[in-house]
Image (tube, rainbow, N blue to C red):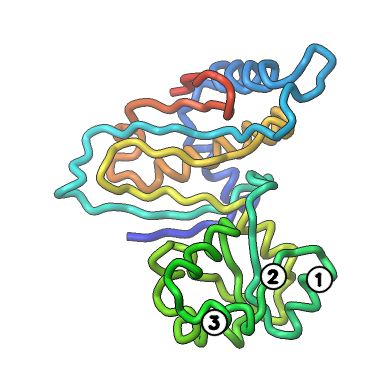
Amino acid sequence: YQRRVHGTLSECLFFFGMAKLAPATLNQAVDDILRFSHTKKGHPKRRFAESVELQVNLKNYDTQKDKRFSGSIKLPRLARPRYRVCVIADAFHEEQAEKFGVAHLSVEDLKKLNKNKKLVKKMCRTADAFLASDSLIKTIPRIVGPHMNRAGKFPTAISQGDDLVAKVDEIKSTIKFQLKKVLCMGVCVGHVEMSGDDLRLNITLAINFLVSLLKKNWQNLKSVHIKSTMGKPHRIY
């Protein structure tokens, strides 16, 4: 089954009420990650913003027999600022994209690919996710074939009434939990340039949303770690 949630204040409060994380353990782990990634003067040690990943191991699940779950949630704080989003734009959204500095492609750009599988795959690699003007979205499979969908990059529709920048930020803040053939999963919940409070908020909301997807809730969690790109994992559950 699938579930999608946006992180409103009421939902945050609801999920916090479910939390079984030890606050002291989470606080220590977040503090250690931020301290390890910065110098004593508070400057980042590396030239890129390390992401912070939530690593989860499940138990008491049979991936062959049990129903597989899939759920997405918009975290309250921007989780992936460097996540690349590209808009397949009509004239209106092309103007908006240029105004706000959002990467974009036109229908003519897609037609030049001539449904060539290698070229479409190469185009898909230029972005982590795609948006498309709702006036164009039905025509995209006819122009590029099935290859965007097979690559997991089929665009999300955007209308003229939507705020383009807000839509891009929504994608950058939305994470997805999906049970596949293995009992471990990892999702990006933030980065080391966030404040400790913002990182803790995203982590807590993400874990409790995942727990709400599990058939036996907390009983299906074997372990939970958080880890920065260059740091060591810290167990928080």
Report the number of discs: 3
Q: Residue at x 18, y 42 (%)?
A: 62
As helix, strand or loop, the secondary structure at mark 2 comes to strand
Q: What amino acid does circle 3 point to?
A: Ile
Q: Nearer the viewer, mark 1 or mark 3?
A: 1
Q: Nearer the viewer, mark 2 or mark 3?
A: 2
> Between disc 1 and disc 3, whose residue precedes?
1
Q: Give yes or no for contact between labels 1 and 3 (Cβ–Cβ under 8 Å).
A: no
Q: Give yes or no for contact between labels 2 and 3 (Cβ–Cβ under 8 Å).
A: no
In which quadrant of the rendered view does residue 228 lie?
top right
> Between disc 2 and disc 3, whose residue precedes?
2
Q: What amino acid does circle 2 point to?
A: His
Picture disc at residue 31 = none
Q: Residue at x 29, y 37 (%)?
A: 183
Q: Residue at x 30, y 32 (%)?
A: 219
Q: Is residue 86 above or below residue 128?
A: below
Horizontal side, residue 91 vs residue 113: left or right: right
Q: Callout 3: 10 Å neighbours few (<14), some, many (20+)?
A: some
Horizontal side, residue 96 vs residue 73: left or right: right
Picture disc at residue 98 = 1
As helix, strand or loop, the secondary structure at mark 3 comes to loop
Report x, y in % for residue 230.
58, 24
Q: CA distance from mark 2 to mark 3?
A: 14 Å
Q: What amino acid does circle 1 point to?
A: Glu
Report x, y in % for residue 179.
32, 47
Q: CA distance from mark 1 to mark 3?
A: 20 Å
Picture disc at residue 137 = 3
Q: Callout 2: 10 Å neighbours few (<14), some, many (20+)?
A: many
Picture disc at residue 104 = 2
Report x, y in % for residue 125.
54, 58
